Image: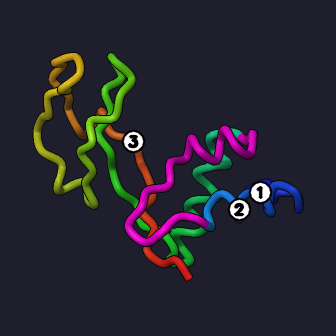
Amino acid sequence: MNQLNPEKLEKFLSIIQPYKEGEYIYPGTLIRQLNIPMAQAYAILETIKELGFVSINYEVYCFKCNKFTGHVFETISQLPEYIECEECGKELNPLNDSIVVYKVAINE
């Protein structure tokens, strides 16, 4: 993983500091605010996951209408066979139509 320069590290800390336990951090937030590639955003979040500060969750996303459905699951085994998008009515397969998000486990 490429290291964040000191300015980006400071910005990263200012981005995640307000998050409280139980809230979700989206990789897209890091991508936009730090101007980093998707792979680096996930690598950073995986690193803080390994430290115990966040856990992986799966949020169902409709790629047809580009909206999150509001359904979030902690494990793949919790994913139902399908969910209907309330926005456009498309039948979604949560296994294929989910995005990894990170749930804050600790906020000190």
Task: Tell which residue pokes out farthest to the right in this image.
Answer: 6
Mark 2 nearby-residue class (10 Å; few <14, some 14–19, many ≥20): few
User: At label 1, which amino acid type do we have?
Assistant: Lys
User: At label 2, which amino acid type do we have?
Assistant: Ser
> Eyeballing the image, is 58 above or below 95?
below
Element at badge 1?
Answer: helix
Element at badge 3?
Answer: strand
Q: Would residue 57 be found to the left or right of residue 6 on screen?
A: left
> Eyeballing the image, is 42 above or below 45?
above
User: At label 3, which amino acid type do we have?
Assistant: Ile
Asked whether the beta carbons under mark 2 and mark 3 sit within 8 Å of each other, the answer is no
Q: Earlier in the sequence, mark 3 or mark 1?
A: 1
Render colour scheme:
rainbow
Tell me how far mark 1 sits from mark 2, CA to CA: 5 Å
Q: Pick the quarter of the image with the C terminus.
A: bottom right
Q: Which residues are magenta?
A: 18-36
Q: Would residue 94 be found to the left or right of residue 38 on screen?
A: left
Mark nearest the camera among 3 and 1 is: 1
Residue at point 66% right, 57% down? Answer: 15
Task: Quadrant for residue 23, please give it.
Answer: bottom left
Residue 34 numbered mark, or none = none
What residue is shown with label 3?
Answer: 99
Name the one closer to the observer, 18 or 48. 18
Residue at point 53% right, 73% down? Answer: 50
Asked whether the beta carbons under mark 1 and mark 2 sit within 8 Å of each other, the answer is yes
Q: Earlier in the sequence, mark 2 or mark 3?
A: 2
Element at badge 2?
Answer: helix
Q: Position of residue 9 (x, y in %)?
A: 79, 61
Q: Pick the quarter of the image with the N terminus.
A: bottom right
> Eyeballing the image, is 90 above or below 26?
above
What residue is shown with label 1?
Answer: 11
What residue is shown with label 2?
Answer: 14
